[in-house]
Image (spheres, rainbow, N blue to C red):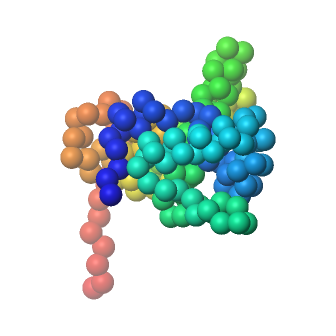
Amino acid sequence: MTIPSLTTIASRLRLRQLRLLIALDEYGSLHKAAEQVSITQPGATKALNDIEATLGVALFERSPKGLAANDLGRCAIRYARLIHTDLAHLREEMLGILQGEGGRLAVGCIMGGVPMLLRALTRLRARQPALAVEIIEDTSARLLPLVDQGRLDLAICRSSVSRRPDDYTELSLHREHLRVVAHP
């Protein structure tokens, strides 16, 4: 079993199909899911068959009680939800920009930088109270890939943990003092 290339998936998968996956997960019924996304049941059946053909795998177990996602189906549904959420964030951010307020900011931060981040965000929110802010606290090694993927706008972390630290535009906020601490 092989999964098609990203190019193949991206050229064949449609947003309406992703909405159908989410509805199938919520309702477990092709008929109810079709109603939710405003298509006919035969249309939903065809769309599901097209999704499974595009991905090259079955996503649901079919039974008289309805449809239940298998492991691959749950994976596809999780990403369908992420894509849907990203589109909602796109819309929200564009509305904020057009209205001259708000917008969205996703920031990653290592634990040591949290106090500095909170002070900066307090000042920023005073100027832009409608700004939606998402904060992810994690290690530098986990935050940098999120920056690379565009899931974070910025991160307060160490770029030195990356295999390509020169790929980042960085601002040094303060010199970190390292200490060796040991039992006597």
Q: Quadrant of residue 83?
A: top right
Could you tell whether 11 is left or right of 75 in the image?
left
Q: Quadrant of residue 172?
A: top left
Question: Residue at 71% across / 58% down in the picture?
Answer: 28
Quadrant placement of the N terminus: bottom left
Residue 157 in sight here: no
User: Does residue 72 sit above or below 182 in this rendering?
Assistant: above
Q: Position of residue 37 (x, y in %)?
A: 72, 38
Q: How many badges with numbers are in the image?
A: 0
Question: Residue at 32% across / 41% down in the picture?
Answer: 5
Q: Position of residue 29 (x, y in %)?
A: 73, 55
Front in this rendered view, residue 33 or 6: 33
Front in this rendered view, residue 30 or 27: 30
Could you tell whether 168 is left or right of 33 in the image?
left
User: Does residue 97 sit above or below 122 in this rendering?
Assistant: above
User: Residue most toward the bottom?
Assistant: 184
Q: Position of residue 171 (x, y in %)?
A: 36, 33
Quadrant placement of the C terminus: bottom left
User: Does residue 43 sit above or below 3 in this rendering?
Assistant: above
Question: Residue at 54% across / 64% down in the picture?
Answer: 70
Q: Position of residue 98 (x, y in %)?
A: 67, 14
